[in-house]
Amino acid sequence: MSFKTYLKEAGGQSGGTMEVTSTSLKEAKEYFTEEMKKDDKDISLIKTFDENFKLLKSLTNKGTEDRIDMPVVSWKQIKAFQEKLVNGELDVKKPFNKEVVDSIG
């Protein structure tokens, strides 16, 4: 079973309405149960939900940045980055292009 259907950005455009770092296992399980019910599925299909959620929570708690402080990258910027990468304009291995290194400071 693929869980991609149920993995959604919590809060959508409003953001922060449900964050992994501040959501309890009980709340997450209740939310996930309701989402799965919409597709006539049962959470019992996921035998390791508790362990997986705890692991996810431990990994996300390592960050110190608030979502509001995170940079926003537009699709236009992502497309431009992809094109530069594909066209060889960006180095992904050393030695990096001196002109690019100097431009970032």
Image (tube, rainbow, N blue to C red):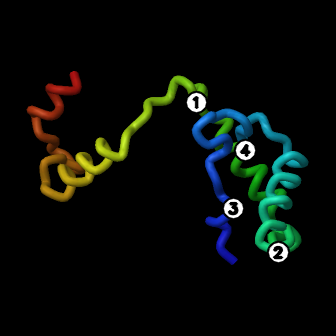
Q: In the image, what residue type sits under mark 2?
A: Asp
Q: Identify the element where label 3 is drawn.
A: helix
Q: Which mark is residue 40?
A: 2
Q: Residues within 10 Å of mark 1 (few under 14, many from 20)?
A: few
Mark nearest the camera among 2 and 4 is 2
Q: Which of the marked residues, 3 or 2, is nearer the chain's N terminus?
A: 3
In the picture of the structure, the residue carrying the numbered disc 3 is 6
Q: Is label 2 in contact with label 4 (beta carbons under 8 Å)? A: no
| Coordinates of residue 34 in the picture (x, y in percent) | 84, 59
- The part of the image, by quadrant, that contains residue 2 is bottom right
- The part of the image, by quadrant, that contains residue 60 is top right
Q: In the image, what residue type sits under mark 3?
A: Tyr
Q: Which of the marked residues, 1 or 4, is nearer the chain's N terminus?
A: 4
Q: In the image, what residue type sits under mark 1?
A: Arg
Q: Which mark is residue 57?
A: 4
Residue 76 in the figure: left or right of residue 34: left
Q: CA distance from mark 4 to mark 3?
A: 17 Å
Q: CA distance from mark 3 to mark 2?
A: 13 Å
Q: Is label 2 in contact with label 1 (beta carbons under 8 Å)? A: no
Q: Residues within 10 Å of mark 3 (few under 14, many from 20)?
A: few
Q: Which mark is residue 67?
A: 1
Q: Identify the element where label 2 is drawn.
A: loop
Q: CA distance from mark 1 to mark 4?
A: 15 Å
Q: Which of the marked residues, 4 or 3, is nearer the chain's N terminus?
A: 3
